[in-house]
Amino acid sequence: MQHIQDGSSLGNPGRAGGGGLIQDEEGNWIVGFACQIGSTTSFLAELWALRDGLNLCLSYNFDAVEVELDAKAIVDAISNPKYTNVFVSPLMEDCRLLVSRIPHIRMRHCYREANRCADGLARLGGLQATDFVMFMCPPMDLVKLLESDFNGLYLHRPCPELLCAS
């Protein structure tokens, strides 16, 4: 199974939401979620969404999961048992515990452009009044993004040109 998640904060801190989707090995939608988090930083929104996504994977009894996040800082923090931060420790420890309960798990960073569906769900979470919503089918706004992902279409990511002093 593949779990892709994202957190979103409109401001830092600001109104935040989280979201994610679980797909099978062929990219078919299994379940998605969006959660309204409140006002927080993007780092905490990412962690919150990760925790919700891992709980969802465990509720479906998946024993092999590949987690993709567009927040490299979260991937690094979860992977480093020495990482501590008093502001996020309870949430970080929850995530580490959930990771340890999935027998075969791999966490990796992906670019935001490869995480567009999860980003859409996270933004939806930040705007909704309900705390947590599960989607057994993709919301209509995500259907085209899922089709693009399935067909292997990618966005061009322009990089700024480096200026060199002569």
Image (cartoon, rainbow, N blue to C red):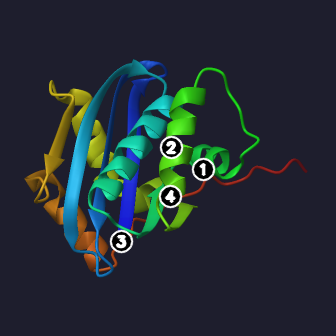
Residue identifier under label 4 = 111
Q: Nearer the viewer, mark 1 or mark 4?
A: 1
Q: Position of residue 93 (x, y in %)?
A: 57, 37
Q: Position of residue 166 (x, y in %)?
A: 91, 51
Q: Is residue 68 above or below residue 93?
A: below
Would you say 99 lies left or right of 160 here?
A: left
**Is mark 2 in CB contact (under 8 Å) with mark 4?**
no
> For residue 151, which quarter of the picture?
bottom left
Q: Earlier in the sequence, mark 3 or mark 4?
A: 3
What's the CA distance linking mark 2 and mark 4? 21 Å
Q: Earlier in the sequence, mark 2 or mark 4?
A: 2
Dot 4: what SS? loop
Q: Nearer the viewer, mark 3 or mark 1?
A: 3
Please name the amino acid that badge 3 sits on: Met
Q: Nearer the viewer, mark 2 or mark 1?
A: 2
Please name the amino acid that badge 2 sits on: Cys
Within 10 angstroms of label 2, few (less than 14), some, or many (20 or more) residues? many
Tag on residue 95? 2
